[in-house]
Every structure is written in structure tokens, then in C-alpha cells.
Amino acid sequence: MMFISLIQKRRSIRKYVQKKVEPEKIDRLVEAAVRAPSSMGSNPWEFIVVEDQDMLAQLSQAKQHGSSFVKGAALAFVICADPEKSQVWVEDAAIATIFIQLAAESMGLGSCWVQIRKRMHDETKTAEEYISDLLNIPEGKRVVSMMAVGYPDEEKAPHGEASLQYEKVHLGSYGRPYK
């Protein structure tokens, strides 16, 4: 699939059929993650692949809103990073997260990003602390996001050309419209 076709088609999928993702597809998702570029090749990211349904149900409670669909996914990636390895660890982890999402789309899988960093689990605990406790993530490693993955149980039309915000693109200097 051509890259532009891939990004035109990609949508956030939050409903999944109850079907396991084949090990070879998981291997390709992992490969996509570890092939993600990082600043100065620092590779500060680390990944936890979760397939256990009980753990997915617990991860789905990471935030009060915006993570419940993880329970229905076949698997989830938890994307972590080590701030000691790079000053731009957040950006590097975000790039790796989108690599997983686009790889999933290219294989006919649905996915949805779950923002974890700077989100709350409840009034006293962050979503990051909640996940770190669940998955025994060492102190010093930071949880940036999760990516729910599975076979889609919903179809969404691509965003139409008219909805694209070309007014936010400037040519040469700010304020000079691209289109």
C-alpha cells in the first residue's frame, strides 16, 4: 500500500472482533516499533506487548475517560521511554507509537492511541503510575502511551478532503496561505 493511501485510510478504531492477532503480525508490529527513528539514535523507548485479557481489562481502566476500549482489543502496546537516554524522549516515544499504528493499518488491523503521559487515573494517581504499578515498570522509565490493536469491528470512512485543515499550512512565512 502506498504511504499516502495508508494515512488517508487510517482511522482510530475502538471496537474489535474477538480474534487473536497472529504471532507473525505481532512480530511485524514489534519490528515497526524498534525501527522507529529517534534523536541521535538514542532509542530511549521500550515496549510492553500485552495479550492477556485480564491485564487488558485492567489497562482499560488506566484513565477515567479514553481507555475503556482497550478491554476489547486483542493486544495493546505500552510505550515507555527512559528520559536519561534522550532530552526528547517524549517525541521519540510518540514517533514509535505512530509507527505501531501505521504498521497495524498496513496489515488490516485496527488501532487506537491512548494518551497516558500527563493523564490521571483518579484524583490521586496518574495513569502513568497506575500502569507502572500494574506492569512492574522500573522507576525512572516513563509511560507515554498505549496502542490498542485488534481486528476492527467498525468501519469508518476516511476523512474527506474538505475536512483537512489546509488553512493551518503556511507558505514561506506565517500567514501566507499554502492553498
Image (tube, grey):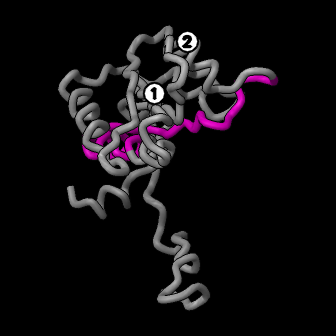
**Labelled disc at residue 134:** 2
**Labelled disc at residue 157:** none
Point out the residue furthest to the right here: 123
Q: Residues within 10 Å of mark 2 (few under 14, many from 20)?
A: few
Q: Quadrant of the N terminus?
A: bottom left
The residue labelled by disc 1 is 78
Q: Nearer the viewer, residue 1 or 96?
A: 96
**Residue 105 visible in the shown view:** no
Query: Element at badge 1?
Result: strand
Magenta region includes residue 148:
no
- Image height check: is 102 above or below 68? below
Query: Amino acid type of disc 2?
Result: Leu
**Residue 7 visible in the shown view:** yes
Query: Amino acid type of disc 1?
Result: Val
Task: Please state if 43 lies on the left or on the right of 63 as rendered.
Answer: left
- Residue range corresponding to the magenta coloring: 96-123
Q: Residues within 10 Å of mark 1 (few under 14, many from 20)?
A: many
Query: Element at badge 2?
Result: helix
Query: Would you identify the image quadrant in which residue 173 lies?
Result: bottom right
